[in-house]
Image: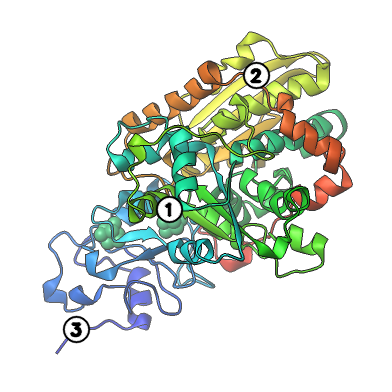
Amino acid sequence: MKNKISRRNFLKLVSSTGVLGTSVLAAGCSGKPSGGTGWMPNQYEGSKNYPIKVKGRIAIDSKNPSIMRDDAKCILCGQCLEVCQNVMSVYGSYELPIKDDTPCVHCGQCTLWCPTGAITEKSNINEVVKALNDPTKFVIVQTAPATRVGLGEEFGLEAGTIVEGKQVAALKKIGFDAVVDTTYSADLTIMEEASEVAHRVLKEPNKLPQFTSCCPGWVKFCEYFGSDIMEHLSSCKSPQQMLGPLIKTYYAKHKNIHPKDIVSVSIMPCTAKKYECNRPEMNAAGIMLGDKNIRDVDYVLTTRELARLIKMNNIDLTTLEDTEYDSILGEGTGAGKIFGTTGGVMEAAVRTLYWLVTKQDPPEVLLDWQAVRGLAGVKEASANVPGVGEVKVAVCSGLKNARIIMERIRNHTAPWQFVEFMACPGGCIAGGGQPRTSLPPSDEVRTLRMQNLYKLDSKRSVKRLSHTNKEVQDLYDQFLEKPLSKKAEQLLHTHYTDRSYQLTIKNK
Ligand code: SF4
Ligand code: SF4
């Protein structure tokens, strides 16, 4: 007879002892977990069949919009638990039994650590292909800054190879009606976020430091574990979610397309973006247009999914001629491009903060701000901004490092005015949707991708300041009026949800 374990016994087990003497255990499951009917994959349900080094695995809720597991491939090695607990500090930070859905910030780092590829993104390729095959739909796609230094790896190119123009060419060949750049809305994010921090510095110093809010994994982490300090979060949506409502309002009007006929797709280095576009409040265009069913972004594909889509269409990315992004949402500055790496948002924001306050371009040092660059988990720097004084900033990536910053805020020892948070170690260049070029992700691969984003900023981009983006200035002139205007607040800003009630935080 098979030695099955019941849910009740499992919960007792995880709150007391280990499995077969090992130290790490899987979290409880709610509903029917994807990739198996229990916490143990079917092939290991009989205890005598456990692999010798069985360590358990992370539970994945069936409702998780970002990740799933193929049970047949799981060898119970424990790598997913390792990264979730010791790099992201999610698993192990809450008490069992769980109260709500299995806690997850959707970072997808477990998809990069799983040696067998059992954990993957939840694919949306079929929905996108269906839209592409529907002649009544206008299918528009945006591409994040970091995918242009990741995608090539899926086609045998060296890690970090810049394939910006080839990616656009591939998307056009596949049949997308327009290809626009999330770098454009990264510049827009900087306009809004730098205006917001300037306002807080000059008028509301009690709300400092301001936290960046472009990383949905970090935002959900803050909602779970930092609800007491959530007022520090910038109200700015991420670049993906700023571009979404603009596509269905400003762009739709400009191109004379009915918003309901638009299918808006994103190519992201990130699995949390799938979760983010499904957040209920991400329908600002629908609210403005009087149809709440209109979503700002319809589908997100990871870099890996895009590679599969390109291969399904028998396209060889490496031989394609470089192609330009489409107007009117296709211009991006170097500042927008470095958004894809840890420290990049801060560097871009301080360059424009300097201009907002002084009306002068920033000094050279802020165009090559070494203090916020590199892979260190926590970085600190300061910049002298005339009229404001010394602006002190911190940058962190990897959610375990976020806890260090959060504790400093709580015990009032934080000297900073502005803090950048990115969930994934190294930032979006090493996001959970990027190619699995090294397992687990290595600093070597991260560094190559990062260096090439900086190369795009310093060598190839004519413009390096978000406020010099002509298409963004046109948007303000023709549609939004100015940063933080009423319409900008409606479309580009958001609010957050206290999720502390969904779990019992473990007192360590
Ligand atoms: S996506 Fe991130 S938070 Fe969710 S299980 Fe994987 S590592 Fe943990
Ligand atoms: S890392 Fe992959 S193979 Fe290992 S336990 Fe987790 S899901 Fe299973």
- Can residue 397 be seen here? no
- Can residue 301 be seen here? yes
Residue depicted at 12% across the width and 73% down the height: 49
Quarter occupied by the N terminus: bottom left
Quarter of the image where one finds residue 461: top right
* Amino acid type, mark 2: Ser
Other-residue count near label 2 (Cα within 10 Å), few / some / many at <14 / 14–19 / ≥20: some
Residue 314 vs residue 276: left or right? left
Image quadrant, ligand 2: bottom left
Query: Could you say whether the residue bearing mark 3 is in a helix, strand or loop?
Result: loop
- Give coordinates of residue 385: x percent, y percent: 75, 16
Residue carrying label 2: 382
Q: State yes or no: Cβ of the residue under disc 1 lies below 8 Å from any atom of ligand 1.
A: yes
| Contact, mark 3 vs mark 2 (Cβ under 8 Å) | no
Check the image and report above or below for 421 versus 70.
above
- Give coordinates of residue 416: x percent, y percent: 67, 28
Which of the two residues, 105 or 168, is positioned nearer the viewer here?
A: 168
Residue carrying label 1: 108
Residue carrying label 3: 3
Mark 1 / mark 2, whichever is N-terminal: 1
* Amino acid type, mark 3: Asn
- Give coordinates of residue 240: x percent, y percent: 61, 47
Mark 3 / mark 1, whichever is N-terminal: 3
Query: Could you say whether the residue bearing mark 1 is in a helix, strand or loop?
Result: loop
Of tags 3 and 1, the one toward the viewer is 1
Count of numbered labels shown in the rendering: 3
